Amino acid sequence: MSKALTQAEQTVLQSPISNDCRVLYLLGLRINANTATTSSAPVDYKALLALLNADSKEPHYLRGRQINSLIKQLEQVGLVTLPLDIDLDRSINGKTLLLPLLSEPVSDFDVLHKQHTAMTADWKPNAPLFKEIANLLGIIDKTFDDNDIGEFVAYWLGRPSSVFSEFQWTQKFANNIKRKRLASGYSSSKVIGTQQVKVAAGIEADDNAKKLVAKYASSKKS
């Protein structure tokens, strides 16, 4: 194994997750991971299926999508983070995953691993941590607003049995923002006249604004 388990890893691995998830993480993804970059070795479906079926007379795992399902569970508890180019609805054979808890957190974030709580109505993501995770996930537009936070909080308030550390909550929020960025039809900018402008959440340029920009653009050409 690459190194001793971090405190954050131990905490999550002792939480209510399946033994198959633990085996996949510890013996399948973590064992040859790069501790400097927290990157796993490339996913090898054949080897992982053999690993998970090792103690079974009748193999329970036969397809790559079953591996993806376990990886999804690992993502949900914060042991795995998916780069932007990975979609668990497709084959990820040969792809590399991120194991964010593999390295001890820097001192600024160490405290964020210590206490586990359910979601609260006044929750806010840790801004510096969000920025770092967003960089790891390849999120270009790192802006978010109260609507993004409110939607996230409202979802998890309805699941009071879900208890995570502040680090994991911010990590989940970053993953949620990533999914929204990849959602069909998302655009952080809009063309008005001949100009491309940033569109803030809930704000649309009205017809008068469009006409004004178009008029200004025409006068510039003449």
Image (cartoon, rainbow, N blue to C red):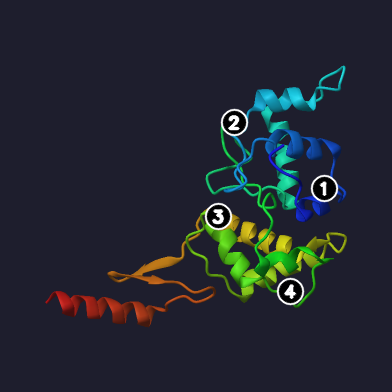
Disc 1, SS? helix
- Residue type at mark 3 is Leu
Q: Would you name the residue on which mark 4 appears?
A: 123
Residue at image point 68% right, 47% down: 80
Quarter holding the N terminus?
top right
Q: Are marks 1 and 3 in contact (CB under 8 Å)?
A: no
Q: Are marks 1 and 4 in contact (CB under 8 Å)?
A: no
Q: Are marks 3 and 2 in contact (CB under 8 Å)?
A: no
Residue at image point 51% right, 54% down: 138
First in residue order: circle 3 vs circle 2: 2
- Residue type at mark 2 is Asn
Q: CA distance from mark 1 to mark 4?
A: 25 Å
Q: CA distance from mark 3 to mark 2?
A: 20 Å
Q: Position of residue 89 (x, y in %)?
A: 63, 39
- Residue type at mark 4 is Trp
Classify mark 4: residues with Cα within 10 Å, few (<14), some (14-19) or many (20+).
Answer: some
Instruction: Mark 1 vs mark 4: give the one in front.
Output: 1
Viewer-nearest residue: 154 or 68: 68
Q: Is residue 216 above or below residue 18?
A: below
Give the residue furthest to the top.
57
Checking the image for residue 93, the label placed there is 2
Classify mark 1: residues with Cα within 10 Å, few (<14), some (14-19) or many (20+).
Answer: many
- Is residue 206 toward the left or the right of residue 82 in the image? left
Checking the image for residue 13, the label placed there is 1
Disc 4, SS? loop
Q: CA distance from mark 2 to mark 1?
A: 24 Å
Classify mark 2: residues with Cα within 10 Å, few (<14), some (14-19) or many (20+).
Answer: some
Q: Would you name the residue on which mark 3 appears?
A: 136
Disc 2, SS? loop
First in residue order: circle 1 vs circle 4: 1
Instruction: Mark 4 vs mark 3: give the one in front.
Output: 3
